[in-house]
Image: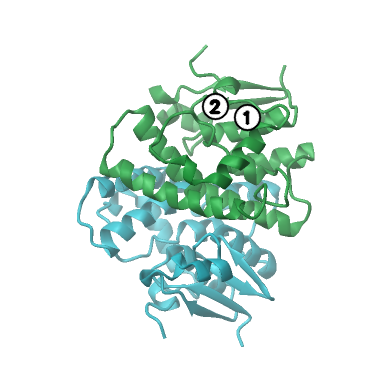
Chain colours: A green, B cyan
């Protein structure tokens, strides 16, 4: 039996943040498929039993259920002794970027990708709005990565894993990624890490 | 001279989270007006000198600059010994709600209010989209507050102060707040706290 169970589905970059952390730190884990596209996370029973916030990822470990990718990443960094902060200043810096990720970098990109690429909305005022917001967040991260190979402390940390949730997703959101040369170089550095896997390889895409 | 300086403007609910915390814990603080509506947070000089993420609030204290409202709230809770967690389980619970707030509850409401109420966009597909997302987040918080007077531990914590960033803003976003009876009752409880002040009383609305 695996030590960790991760409620997830392949298309969720928020779940991928945790799946990749589990993989890179060499944990024994298994996915529990969540049928998001058929509304499972909106069902009252799922919210009552698994997560009242109606979101993946949910990590089961030692009889507890943990939610929110940033908190789960911190938990796994503490337990594994890998990819966490070395001191208080780094800790604050990691959280500063994980919060920016949750508020803007992942948030707008994920909403754009869901609507534009997964529900096939075509171009609308909403997709234009989300692309504008996502692009502004990408510019801020790109400017930071112009100065440093990874977000905090010059090495891979959970701040990188948080921000990397959706950047390997293959769907074309209509954002010209060639503008973000520092993000592209950072993605290549992450992809070159031993044990790196694509989200669609790490997590189930359909039930069963 | 005040112990704390808060870079802010009255219309920012994210800054209000921190301003209200400073006020309720009885700190000596002064606002530093940020001219958001004339683009100050988008200027390269401001980003280089004050916050590369281009956002308020920024708290100056003891020669350091802190950003991200959730991190600042935690810092002030630790320093003041007020409104923080009593144990590790509460700490995780507080962070679970502050992350949900950053990702969804504040994020969608603030974007809707900015576009619909402050730029006077009128009703568009974008405002309808944001209202739908904000309403979904409000329902999740309302369901939680049906079970407890405050978000965590039965008393006011920084989780409440984070979620309360925009709920006292007077502008009509077109969301029918009477649907959210538990949020309305919680707002009344916060408003009744000794020292509570409205955002437009706590922070400057124009330069000077």
Foreground of the two, A120 or B82 = A120
Which residue is at the front of the view, B138 or A138? A138
- Number of marks drawn: 2
The CA distance from mark 1 to mark 2 is: 9 Å
Position above or below: B102 against A48: below
Q: Chain of mark 2?
A: A
Could you tell me residue A106's position as x and y percent?
50, 43
Query: How far across and how far down the image is residue A154, in percent?
Result: 72, 50
Quick check: can you spot residue B148?
no
- Badge 1 marks a residue whose secondary structure is helix
Badge 2 density bin: few <14, some 14–19, many ≥20, Cα 10 Å: many
Residue at image coords 70%, 41%:
A75
Residue that lies at the very extreme toward the left in this rendered image: B122
Residue sitting at x 59%, y 54%: A144
In the picture, measured across the screen, residue B137 lies left or right of residue A4, that is: left
**Would you say the residues marked 1 and 2 are in contact, meaning their CB atoms lie under 8 Å apart?**
yes
Name above or below for residue B188 compared with residue B174: below
Residue under numbered circle 1 = A19
Q: Counting residues from the N terminus, which is met first, the one under dot 1 or under dot 2?
A: 2
Residue A85 appears at what percent x and percent y?
74, 50
Looking at the rendered image, the quarter that the N terminus of chain A falls into is: top right
User: Farthest bottom residue?
Assistant: B1
Q: Which residue is mark 2?
A: A8
A68 above or below B27? above
Chain of the residue displaying label 1: A
- Residue at image position (24%, 54%) is B174
Q: In which image quadrant can residue A27 be found? A: top right
| Residue A155 pos. (x, y %) | 73, 46
State left or right for residue B30 relative to residue B64: left
- How packed mark 1 is, by other alpha carbons closer than 10 Å (few <14, some 14-19, many 20 or more), is many
């Amino acid at each position: 039996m695996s030590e960790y169970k991760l409620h997830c589905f392949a298309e969720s970059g928020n779940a991928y943040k945790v799946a990749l952390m589990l993989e890179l730190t060499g944990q024994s884990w298994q996915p529990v498929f969540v049928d998001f596209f058929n509304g499972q996370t909106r069902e009252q029973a799922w919210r009552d039993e698994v997560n009242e916030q109606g979101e993946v990822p949910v990590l089961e470990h030692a009889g507890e259920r943990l939610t929110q990718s940033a908190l789960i990443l911190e938990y796994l960094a503490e337990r594994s002794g890998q990819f966490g902060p070395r001191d208080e200043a780094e800790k604050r810096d990691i959280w500063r970027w994980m919060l920016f990720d949750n508020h803007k970098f992942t948030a707008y990109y994920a909403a754009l990708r869901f609507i534009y690429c997964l529900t096939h909305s075509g171009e609308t005022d909403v997709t234009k709005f989300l692309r504008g917001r996502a692009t502004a967040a990408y510019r801020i991260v790109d400017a930071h990565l112009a100065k440093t190979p990874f977000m905090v402390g010059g090495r891979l940390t959970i701040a990188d894993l948080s921000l990397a949730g959706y950047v390997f997703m293959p769907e074309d959101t209509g954002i010209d990624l060639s503008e973000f040369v520092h993000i592209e170089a950072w993605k290549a550095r992450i992809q070159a890490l031993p044990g790196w896997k694509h989200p669609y390889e790490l997590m189930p895409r359909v039930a069963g």
